[in-house]
Amino acid sequence: MAAMITSWNPEKKHSEVERWICIYPAYLNSKKTLAQGRRLPKSSCVENPTHQEIRDVLVSTGLPVGVENKLYPREQSKEMLFRGRIRVQIKNDDGTPLKPEYSTRESVMKFIGEAIPKLKTRQNRGI
């Protein structure tokens, strides 16, 4: 049986999945309002990102990434397209950043917002 993810605990190490940051596609969706869950300015967001796109972009950074079959609580639609939560480890066990350029949740999300439009799947949509 898979290990259950327990509630947050400051005693846990940063390498444990419970301490990794969570990113829902809604955080980066330019079609959403702040009240609907968008976390960045629209200029830093992309239109309807999927958890697969977010995962693909983060894997390229070399950071440890995990995908969970979760639905964002504020999401109105229950469709599979809107499911998915990404977990990313950004800190070592001693609290130092794994990669200095991705030391905060905001820096990771801004990178995702810049990188998703560069994906080949996004490039071909205009044709």
Image (cartoon, rainbow, N blue to C red):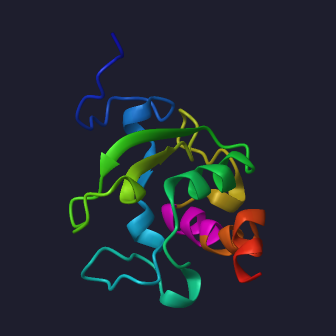
Q: Residue furthest front?
A: 127
Is residue 127 toward the left or the right of residue 103 in the image?
right
- Magenta region's main secondary structure? helix
Q: Residue at x 27, y 38 (%)?
A: 8
Does residue 60 sit above or below 102 in this rendering? above
Is residue 1 toward the left or the right of residue 104 in the image?
left
Q: Which residues are magenta?
A: 105-112
Q: Position of residue 24 (x, y in %)?
A: 40, 59
Q: Nearer the viewer, residue 14 or 71?
A: 71
Does residue 112 sit above or below 8 in this rendering? below
Q: Residue at x 76, y 74 (%)?
A: 123
Q: Position of residue 76 (x, y in %)?
A: 22, 69
Q: Position of residue 39 (x, y in %)?
A: 40, 75
Which quarter of the rendered picture does the C terminus lie within?
bottom right
Q: Position of residue 75 (x, y in %)?
A: 25, 66
Q: Can residue 115 be found in the magenta stretch?
A: no
Which quarter of the rendered picture does the N terminus lie within?
top left
